[in-house]
Amino acid sequence: MPDAVDQLIEVGRKVVATGLVIGSGGNLSARSPDGDACWITGAGTWLEELDRSAFSLVRIEDGAVLSGNPAPSTEVRLHLRSYQARPDATALIHLHPQLSVLLDAMGHRLRLVTTDHAFYVGSVERVPWYRPGTEELARAAAAAVADGCNCVILAQHGCSVLADSVELAHKRVLNLEEAARATYAALLLGGSVPECPSP
Ligand SMILES: [Zn+2]
C-alpha cells in the first residue's frame, strides 16, 4: 500500500497531466505518521517529476528540517501554520489553478453547483493577496481554515486545500477548480445558478 509520500508523488503527476496546473504551480505536503512533522515538496521541484528525494521532513512546531531534501518549499510556512491551526488535517495541497484564481480576482464567488462540489468543497474562504512565501500569507490562510473550512483561495495566487487524507485533498482541489469551471460557464450563459444543498 502506498504511503502518503507515494500518494503525493502521484497527485503531483496527475494535477499536471490533467491541466489543473503547470508543473511548478504549487507544493504538496502530508503529515508524518506521528503527526509532529510533515513531508513537503522541496523548493524548485516540478510537480510532475517528484520522487521521494524531492521531499523534506519538516517539524510542524518550528520548521526544523529533520531529514530528506534540505531545502523545503519556499511556501513551507503556509503548510506549517495550517497544520498548527488544524490538528485534524493530515494533507495540504497548495496549487495555482487558473480559473479559481481568475474568478476570485474578478470578484466572483465560486458557486457549488453539483452534489460533488458541495460534498467535497463544502465552503470556500478567501484571503487577500500577500507576498508568496511570507509569514503574513501563512497566518492569513491558517486563520481562514481554523474553524473547519478546508478550501481557501489565496488572492491572485492559488488555493490551499486541507483534508484528513491525500486522496480527499486531491478530490477537493479537483472539485474546487471544477466548481470554478461551472461558475465560469454560468457567467458566460448569463443566468443565475442555484447552490447545491449540502448532501
Ligand atoms: Zn503558490
Image (cartoon, rainbow, N blue to C red):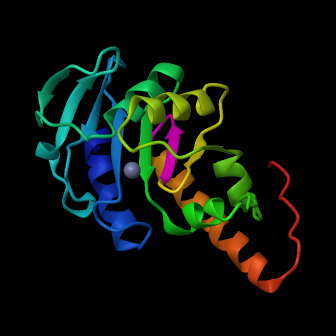
- Looking at the picture, how far across and down is residue 100, in whole percent? 58, 62
Q: For the point 33% across and 48% down, which residue is it?
A: 27
Q: Taking 51 as reference, is 133 above or below it? A: above
- Looking at the picture, how far across and down is residue 195, in whole percent? 84, 59
Residue lying at the far bottom of the rendered structure: 189
Q: Taking 87 as reference, is 155 above or below it? A: below
Residue 80 visible somewhere in the drawing: yes
Q: How many marks?
A: 0
Q: Does the magenta segment cover residue 164? A: yes
Give the magenta part as a residue range.
158-165
Left or right relative to 103: residue 31: left
Of helix, strand and loop, which mostly describes the magenta segment?
strand
- Looking at the picture, how far across and down is residue 81, in whole percent? 44, 25
Residue 120 or 178: which is nearer the viewer? 178
Residue 3 visible somewhere in the drawing: no
Q: Taking 154 as reference, is 140 above or below it? A: above
Q: Taking 70 as reference, is 44 above or below it? A: below
Left or right relative to 7: residue 160: right
Left or right relative to 130: residue 10: left
Q: For the point 27% across and 34% down, which residue is it?
A: 39
Q: Quadrant of residue 29?
A: top left
Q: For the point 41% across and 73% down, which residue is it?
A: 19
Q: For the point 35% across and 59% down, which residue is it?
A: 25
- Looking at the picture, how far across and down is residue 176, in whole percent? 60, 58
Q: Quadrant of residue 2?
A: top left
Residue 12 or 1: which is nearer the viewer? 12
Q: Quadrant of residue 90?
A: top left
Q: Quadrant of the N terminus?
A: top left
Q: Does the magenta segment cover residue 143? A: no
